[in-house]
Image (spheres, grey):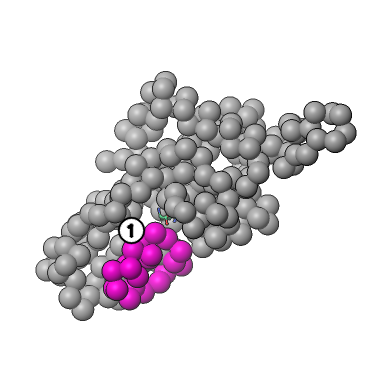
């Protein structure tokens, strides 16, 4: 088993614990979020899943994806309770979250977007009128909608919010741009009406596990340098 620790062996050093346990990198992710993470034929796929593989490879470890509700990820609970070593879940770096766990360097520039049905007549945030806006619970999209006074309706995952739009239960969804673009591509009656709020995505690591954080950051730096990041963007983003 691979157990790299921060201990110097002199008996009095302090360590945040093993870098990872048993040669397995456990990754919490909410797979309702293509192209970052989703399931296809029973397998986890997406940009983040490939990133997890690269991080694990650099640690000489295997990856185990732990399917986790996003609220538990962004609140820090999943990391605190050691359900996983890292959280990779299309998660935007922000101050509230950074108080609960550490973020890697950014691995993706993102933004929020408004998804509507083509026949809705909604062309921007300003023309929402009485439209009911759906958001995924615990996301930056939810915070944004609240801040705009939109009184959004919460869904446990992103796929459920988009399904509600398809069913006519809500008239708009606020979510990240790449995810709503996938939805619009899969359903020709949906369209992206507006984009706003730039964000950066990061990997969450339990506070104090600096060795693991360093390793994650080294992988991110490497994939930007050697062109792997660019190929991932080409593979997963349209
Ligand atoms: N980027 C947004 C946030 O951090 C949404 C992330 C949702 N991720 C997911 N896997 N469902 O709040």
Indicate the quadrant where residue 209 lies: top right
| Secondary element at image label 1 | strand
**Residue 145 place in picture, x, y as percent:** 32, 67
Instruction: Identify the residue at image location x=35%, y=29%.
Output: 230
Disc 1 residue: CB within 8 Å of ligand 1: yes
Position above or below: 219 against 22? above
Judge left or right: residue 238 versus residue 31.
left
In reply to whether residue 144 is colored magenta, the answer given is yes
Question: Which quarter of the rendered picture does the N terminus lie within?
Answer: top right
Indicate the quadrant where residue 107 lies: top left
Q: How crowded is mark 1: few (under 14 residues within 10 Å), some or many (20 or more)?
A: many
Instruction: Identify the residue at image location x=47%, y=24%.
Output: 222
Judge left or right: residue 3 versus residue 100.
right
Residue 29 appears in view: no
Residue 174 appears in view: yes
Quadrant assignment for ligand 1: bottom left
**Residue 30 place in picture, x, y as percent:** 49, 55
**Residue 21 place in picture, x, y as percent:** 72, 40
Extreme residue in the bottom direction:
130
Extreme residue in the front direction:
12
Instruction: Identify the residue at image location x=29%, y=73%.
Output: 150
Magenta residues (range): 137-159
The residue carrying mark 1 is: 175
Position above or below: 114 against 24? below
């Amino acid at each position: 088993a691979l157990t790299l620790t921060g201990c110097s062996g002199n008996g009095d050093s302090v360590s945040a614990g093993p870098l990872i346990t048993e040669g397995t990198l456990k990754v919490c992710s909410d797979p309702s979020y293509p192209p970052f993470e989703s399931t296809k034929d029973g397998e986890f796929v997406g940009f983040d899943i490939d990133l997890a593989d690269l991080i694990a490879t650099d640690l000489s470890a295997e990856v185990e994806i732990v399917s986790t509700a996003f609220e538990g990820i962004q609140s820090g609970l999943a990391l605190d309770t050691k359900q996983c070593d890292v959280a990779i879940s299309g998660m935007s770096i922000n101050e509230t979250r950074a108080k609960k766990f550490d973020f890697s360097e950014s691995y993706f520039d993102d933004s929020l977007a408004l998804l509507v049905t083509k026949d809705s007549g909604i062309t921007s945030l300003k023309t929402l009128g009485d439209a009911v806006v759906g958001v995924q619970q615990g996301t930056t999209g939810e915070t944004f909608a609240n801040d705009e006074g939109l009184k959004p309706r919460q869904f446990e995952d992103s796929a459920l919010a988009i399904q509600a739009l398809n069913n006519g239960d809500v008239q708009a969804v606020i979510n990240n741009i790449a995810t709503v673009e996938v939805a619009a591509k899969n359903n020709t009656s949906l369209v992206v009406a507006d984009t706003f709020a730039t964000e950066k995505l990061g990997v969450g690591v339990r506070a104090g596990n600096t060795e693991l954080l360093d390793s994650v950051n080294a992988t991110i730096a490497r994939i930007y340098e050697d062109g792997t990041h660019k190929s991932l963007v080409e593979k997963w983003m349209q």
